[in-house]
Image (spheres, rainbow, N blue to C red):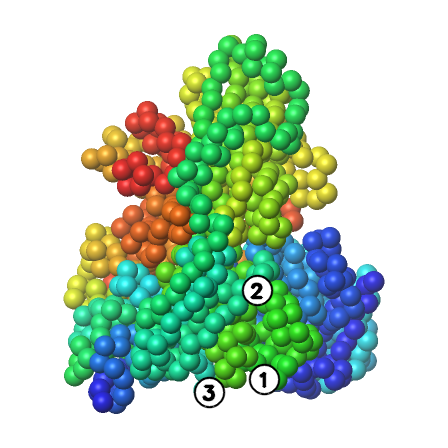
Amino acid sequence: MITLHINGEKHEINVSSEMPLLWAIRDIIGLTGTKYGCGKGLCGSCKVLLDNSPVQSCIIPVSAAEGKEILTIEGKSKNLQLLQQSWIDLNVPQCGFCQPGQLIAATALLDKNDNPNDTEIDEAMIGNICRCGTYQRIKKAIHKTVELKKQN
Amino acid sequence: MKTIKNISRRSFVKSIGLASGGLIIACNTSIFSDKDKIPKDLIDFNPNLFVQLNSDGSLILIASRSEMGNGVRTSLPSIIADEMDADWEKVTVKQATGDKKYGDQNTDGSRSIRYLFEPMRKMGAIARTMLISAAAQKWDVSTSECSAENHFIVHSSGKKIGFGDLVEIAKTLKTPEEDTLTYKSPKDYKYIGKDLSSVDVKDYVTGSAIYGLDKRLPNMKFMAVQRCPVTFGTIKSFDKTDALKIPGVEAVIELPRIERPFGALGGVGVIASNTWAAFKGKEALKIEWDFGENEVYNSKKFMNQITKNVHKNGKVLKDKGNISKAFKKASKIIESTFQLPHLIHAPMEVPVAIAWVQGDSCEVWASTQTPQASRKEVIDYLKTSEEKVTINVTLLGGGFGRKSKPDYVVEATIASKEINAPVQVVWTREDEIKHGYYHTVSAQYLKASLNNEGNVTGWLHRFALPSISSTFAPGVEYASGGESGSATNLPFNIKNVKVEIGKAKAHVRIGWLRSVINIPHGFSINVFADELAYAAGKDPLDFRLNLIGEDRIVNPKAKNLKLNSARLKNVLKVAAKNAKWGKELPEGHAYGLAVHYSFFSYVASVVEVSMKNNKLRVHNVYTAIDCGVVVNRNTIKAQMEGAAIFGMSLAYYGKITVKDGAIEQSNFHDYKMIRMNETPTVHVEIVESTEKSTGVGEPGVPVIAPAIVNAIYKLTGKRYYNLPLSDHGIV
């Protein structure tokens, strides 16, 4: 039995300890917002926060996530919610498939950096591919979120 | 036939999942525009259903095309809602299943709005007209005293009634004759031409959007398939012992090859209780293959061969004037050879389909651009009838043409029938890259003559590429008409033009990828035209405008949507104006331009690049598009922004190579994509137009790579004829 804490909820699952966290989240627990894109940690579609750090869940064995707090796109965090609103306001997504991973990466950035510049955004987001090419709007939406936070 | 029926009380309403009691508007396929494009077997009297108004005022509008980032689930229903004077807030969009009654649902070719703008307006106009009649009847007044306004019918006296309250009367009325319908004036549009957010945006950002990958059914199994590394190779033998030892693996089955354009490739399927077990089981298979005749395919050798083929006379497609004479009299001859590699789609969501075969029935959930072709494949495989097969269309995590080939739907169907349970086939990223329908590889040879004034007097364009037709008719060795149009409809004012094609045999499945043939033709023509400008000693913008020449219709024989040189020049001028072409740029920066007509739309881009330590950087892209009447401004802008990135990815990195018949690339480390740190600022202007709406999804792509290459030339004096640029060490 492996115990996972996802979005504040406890899940006990009976899987091989080698199973990548991605498939445990998607196929065993049933949260499908976290996506499979490459299986090799190359595209960022599967990003989740593990104790507040962004990880590519497709290459992290489920055993490595035991005892840690996992945040997926279905979860709630202040920065994630603000970013989601900016994503909506700026019509960021096209097909939308990579956006959960993009939002998780952006959440991790804002959790650590209140006021990232373009270079810092590039560095934080470089691991996330968007084949539709929404990068420009993603960057704008991150800046917009920062501005909103400053105003509040 | 122009019959339109009110089918509210018809019995099949329930069968398509629409609750009874509402007002449902149906129409015949025959009112669709571009009739000739609709396959003949679709021209019948089956109704198409798009509008359901409920008595609580809620309005369900059907999206008949697939959503893959193209915005159709927003744009198509918004046309109905606008013409109906409905309140967009009250609209719910429902995805159509794959069914001929919706007309052509094939979501590719950048034609959803082009085909459906008028039919969707008609759906809205019919609904509005009937609601007005219902109110007039209720109030016992003339319809001329009533009008529709934001989900109400308003009488000239000022009294008004909500749409929902008119349902009971409206559903008893006869549907108006088509020729009695009236339409809103474009100046009164509320949604058309404006920025509408995607109806799915909240689902996208909260992770609740359901793609093919996310659909779940009770007792559903997951399948991964090992296919032959060489296209159309077959299994000699396989050992499943180790695969079956993987925890979670439940069965290993042999999948036959279905020899049809969209048939399954065949292979060994590992069926498991979760995706990871299926993937692991697949890795544990031991298979001996018979690679078959395509083992001879080596893309490097093949490129040399097709390059030879374009350096000798080919099959003549066009011969205007006298090219030999022009070349003889020339004061300058320029010739160049271009080589462009295979590409693969790489949508972020791999191909995924679920099939559940029960007896002679089958229900499918798939990320598909083509639910009707999917349905046909399933019907034919199961040898069953149409009504026994339902194709549900999920959201698509990108498509780019890959998901209009439903081979993966067939795989799921074969497996579900075999194991008697719902099966979701999930391609790995490696599968997607190694077993796709490849964008064609091509060699292009261009030769032109200049006179003393630096004007182009002769133009020879010869190309060789394995044709998409080979996927449908094995053995085809020449490009089809559709793959030649952007060369033969050359929008340049040149007296002597010759276009020829050389031989090229296909050794992989060739398919269409976003922008299709416009990628290689748009590249070679735009780079060569730029080269001619410098040879003539002229500014590339002035030279190009002059080369396009006087205002005229370039292809007067075309049936509709003719190529208008004035509109082509205009987008180039707009892009140049927005870039301030000619202005002083920062040290080490340069502009390049390209302009191309495709999918009946006109697009130009000016690109600003720099090179630092021999590494390219694209800073700005100024794109202008003329796609006729704008439906959703936000979507068009987004598509142009995305097209710049898609175009940059293929310019920088796009290359699929083949060794001994097998694709050499496997994942995003060796088939790279543009990422955030390489992203330029894309500035988009949409030209105001009252012309018919034309394509948006694809026409933004072809200009990007040539504009970049032209800018690099301006900056460095080095001209790149082969893509991708990663081969030249500059990215």
Closer to the camera: disc 1 or disc 3?
1
Q: Which residue is mark 1?
A: B358
Label 3 resides on the chain identified as: B
Q: Is residue B618 left or right of residue B129?
A: left
User: The C terminus of chain B lies in which quarter of the figure?
Assistant: top left
Write the residue at 61% across / 71% down.
B381
The residue under label 2 is which amino acid type?
Answer: Ile
Residue at disc 2, secondary structure: loop
- Nearer the observer, disc 1 or disc 2? 2
Q: Is residue A62 above or below residue B300?
A: below
Give B100 or B268, whichever is nearer the viewer: B268
* Nearer-N-terminus badge (1/3): 3
Q: Which residue is mark 2?
A: B258
- 3 or 2: tag closer to the N-terminus: 3
- Compute the Cα span from label 3 to label 2: 28 Å
Question: In which quarter of the view is residue B104 placed?
Answer: bottom right
- Using the numbered discs, state the Cα–Cα distance from disc 1 to disc 2 in whole angstroms: 21 Å
